[in-house]
Structure formats: structure tokens, C-alpha cells
């Protein structure tokens, strides 16, 4: 029996860059999730710099209950009400992606978990274009350094 050899047309240094970029992205995701769940939920309440976390939660739970977007909100400018100023894509993306966790959690908790994870996911994905920009403008090393700095940057 001969030895099985796996060959690839991709050079070894490219695999190294892919591995380093994957490690940087894993670090970025870990830091964003670690600091998102603990400090943002104190004593069972969402803590933020304003009221956005509560209002996003309100819109998401409304979508889950009513199965359509909250267009006119009677709680804004109470008692008159006003149109919801937030575009629907963010909230619908959270509701739809929460189906991943539906086998493990109920609909509301799955959606609220995605509300916490969504910024971490998109923040982690910004590392790829930054690496590509640094690589294109300078070289691979600069792209990796820029990606690493973005990964550890508090955001």
C-alpha cells in the first residue's frame, strides 16, 4: 500500500495566512461575546448607554407576537404615538436568524440571544475587509496587523 498524499494548489504561506486570520477572527468573536453578555445584563436587566436595547427588544418581541413589523408605535410620543423611526432589516434579520436557536430556546429568548450576538458577529466579519484593504494597499503582514488591532479594539 502506498502512502496517501493530499496535495493542494494553494501555497503553504497562503494556508498560514488563512489560519492566522481565522485565529484573529476567533479572538475577535470571543472578546465581543465575552464583554457583551456579562456587562450588558446586570441583575436581569439590559444595561446600555441609552434606551436602544429596550426599544430593540420591544420591536423584536412585537414582530414575534404580531408576525409583522411595528410601523406605528403608540409608546413613542405617548399618548399620541408616532411612526417607528428604525428601519426593519436589523430586527427582521435578528428574528429570522433566531431560528438557529429555536430547538434549544423559546422564540423570545432565542431572538434576544441573537440581539446580543448580532453586533459580535458583524463586528467579527469586519476583520475580513480590513485585512483585504491592508493587504491590497501594503502587504499581507500589514493586513494581518490591522486585522489583529481591530480584533482587540474595544468597540
Image: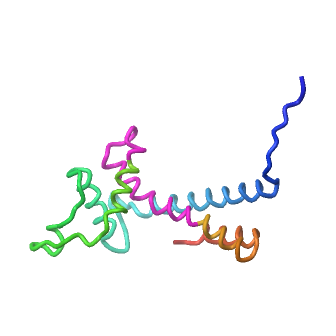
Colour scheme: rainbow
Q: Nearer the viewer, residue 50 or 84?
A: 84
Specify the segment rendered in magenta.
99-126
Q: Percent position (x, y) of residue 79?
A: 9, 72
Name which residue lies at 50% across and 59% down: 121
Q: Is residue 123 magenta?
A: yes
Residue at the front extreme, as displayed? 9
* Residue 35 image offset from top left, x and y in percent: 50, 63
Which residue is at a point 81% across and 58% down the rendered structure image?
Answer: 13
Magenta: main secondary structure? helix
Coordinates of residue 61 in the picture (x, y in percent) = 26, 55
Front position in the image: 3 or 120? 3
Left or right of 134: which side holds 4? right
Image quarter hosting the N terminus: top right
Which corner quadrant of the image does residue 54 belong to? bottom left
Q: Judge whether 7 appears above or below 142 on screen.
A: above
Residue 132 located left or right of residue 105: right
Give the image quarter of residue 83: bottom left
Residue 88 horizontal/vertical position (percent): 31, 63
> Residue sitting at 42 percent across and 58 percent down?
116
Residue 49 drawn in magenta:
no
Is 83 or 60 nearer to us in this picture? 83
Q: Residue furthest left?
A: 79
Amino acid at each position: 500500500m502506498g502512502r496517501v498524499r493530499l496535495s493542494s494548489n494553494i501555497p503553504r504561506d497562503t494556508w498560514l495566512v488563512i489560519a492566522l486570520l481565522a485565529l484573529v477572527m476567533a479572538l475577535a468573536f470571543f472578546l465581543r461575546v465575552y464583554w457583551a453578555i456579562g456587562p450588558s445584563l446586570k441583575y436581569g436587566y439590559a444595561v446600555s448607554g441609552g434606551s436602544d436595547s429596550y426599544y430593540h427588544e420591544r420591536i423584536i418581541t412585537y414582530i414575534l407576537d404580531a408576525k409583522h413589523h411595528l410601523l406605528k408605535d403608540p409608546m413613542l410620543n405617548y399618548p399620541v404615538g408616532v411612526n417607528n423611526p428604525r428601519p426593519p432589516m436589523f430586527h427582521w434579520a435578528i428574528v429570522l436568524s433566531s431560528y438557529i436557536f429555536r430547538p434549544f430556546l423559546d422564540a423570545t429568548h432565542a431572538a434576544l440571544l441573537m440581539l446580543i450576538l448580532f453586533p459580535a458577529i458583524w463586528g467579527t466579519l469586519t476583520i475580513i475587509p480590513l485585512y483585504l484593504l491592508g493587504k491590497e494597499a501594503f502587504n499581507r503582514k500589514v493586513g494581518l496587523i490591522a486585522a489583529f488591532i481591530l480584533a482587540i479594539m474595544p468597540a
